[in-house]
Image (cartoon, rainbow, N blue to C red):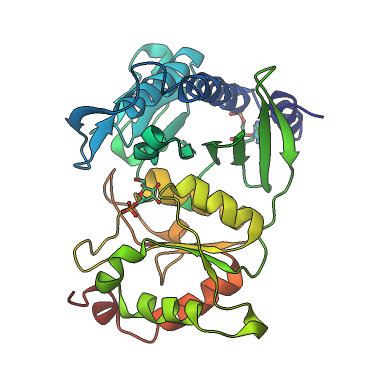
Amino acid sequence: MITLSEYIIKKQHEFPEATGELTSLLGSIQLAAKVVNREINKAGLVDIIGTTGVENVQGEVQQKMDLYANDVFKSALKARGEVCGVASEEEDEFVTFDDQEGMNNKYVVLMDPLDGSSNIDVNVSVGTIFSIYRRVSKIGEKVILDDFLQTGDKQVAAGYVIYGSSTMLVYTTGFGTHGFTCDPSLGVFYLSHENMQIPDDGAMYSINEGNYLKFPLGVKKYLKYCQEIDSATKRPYTSRYIGSLVSDVHRNLLKGGIYIYPSTASSPQGKLRILYECNPMAFLVEQAGGRATDGFRRIMEIDPTELHQRVPFFCGSPNMMDKVEEMMAEFSPEANYFQPV
Ligand code: AMP
Ligand code: P6P
């Protein structure tokens, strides 16, 4: 039973030149995850559920847990002293660690500190998503926006924490996707899912079908395909949608499946943010043998232009991705994306 900390250090030794900065950074994320996990597990007992009444830059009402998780991860990252800046779903602008120590660091972190947090009040799984890059600006100077606006294939590491029936931390540094389960009696993450591999095929699809009328034509055609009766291809598939990206993708990673948050007529760019939701999840799923696109383009090749930029997000088993993209390609992007309600 190898712990997460032991595993991270073991992997560091495969890089003789490594200084230990990434190891230390990953350790600070692990610590923050344990602190957030402790509060989530008693959210009903302390005044930390419900909303703050404040809207974030996304126009979404911030949950008290959103802000709590955001502060815990920011503080852990700053205290550990390995990053020069942080971007977060809960922060309008990126956060600069502008003391000299901070400016001398070479990594930046982007995060969704608590994804799906509206589920907290109803005791449904939520998650944290993180993405780590090397800065592109000069070490010793303040971090700049370009340090965050990098394509997903430049990620050094990415991962998520799922606060579910058990708490897991799943991460990749480009050499496979690996899952660690927390033993709550010790507060220690142990390796439980080494080198996760998503099944090539699945029989489960995750999408908010309430938006059906606004979906692109290609998505509508794919949903009908999923619902047709064809025992040879295990259809009709099962519809499973938790309203928590981390939970839906984690289940699909293990069982096979596809998660789709497409553009809709009212939200042409979809809902999910490329930098701290889609890119890290795409990295993890690709490292597990799956695929992630916007229906046409590989997510990790899309050049981001804004910190909170949204993209349509299709992610999952490769054969299911092939099928939905085949149907998306039958329609022009205009017909696909701006189909009147
Ligand atoms: P560092 O000097 O600690 O910033 O590490 C330099 C590079 O080595 C990192 O950007 C990674 O590409 C790799 N590396 C270092 N430590 C680890 C680790 N614990 N796990 C995976 N890759 C690592
Ligand atoms: P909808 C949570 O707000 C989230 O960002 C993802 O975790 C989740 O999959 C999606 O949005 C749910 O959005 O519009 O279906 O409620």
Residue 174: percent from the left, percent from the top? 63, 47
Q: Is residue 280 visible?
A: no
Residue 148 lies in quadrant = top left
Quarter of the image where the C terminus is located: bottom left
Residue 197: percent from the left, percent from the top? 69, 56
The furthest residue to the right: 1
**Is 204 left or right of 210, judged from the image as shown?**
right
- Which residue is found at the position 62% from the left and 34% from the top? 166
Question: Is 164 placed above or below 282 here?
Answer: above
- Which residue is found at the position 29% from the left and 78% from the top? 336
Residue 24 lies in quadrant = top right
Figure label count:
0
- Which residue is found at the position 40% from the left and 22% from the top? 74
Residue 32: percent from the left, percent from the top? 50, 21
Residue 110: percent from the left, percent from the top? 41, 36
**Is 281 left or right of 115, judged from the image as shown?**
right
Residue 219 lies in quadrant = bottom left
- Which residue is found at the position 45% from the left and 56% from the top? 241
Question: Is 91 placed above or below 275 here?
Answer: above
Foreground pick, 37 / 316: 37
**Is 21 left or right of 292, judged from the image as shown?**
right
Foreground pick, 69 / 148: 69
Quarter of the image where the N terminus is located: top right
**Is 173 left or right of 91, judged from the image as shown?**
right
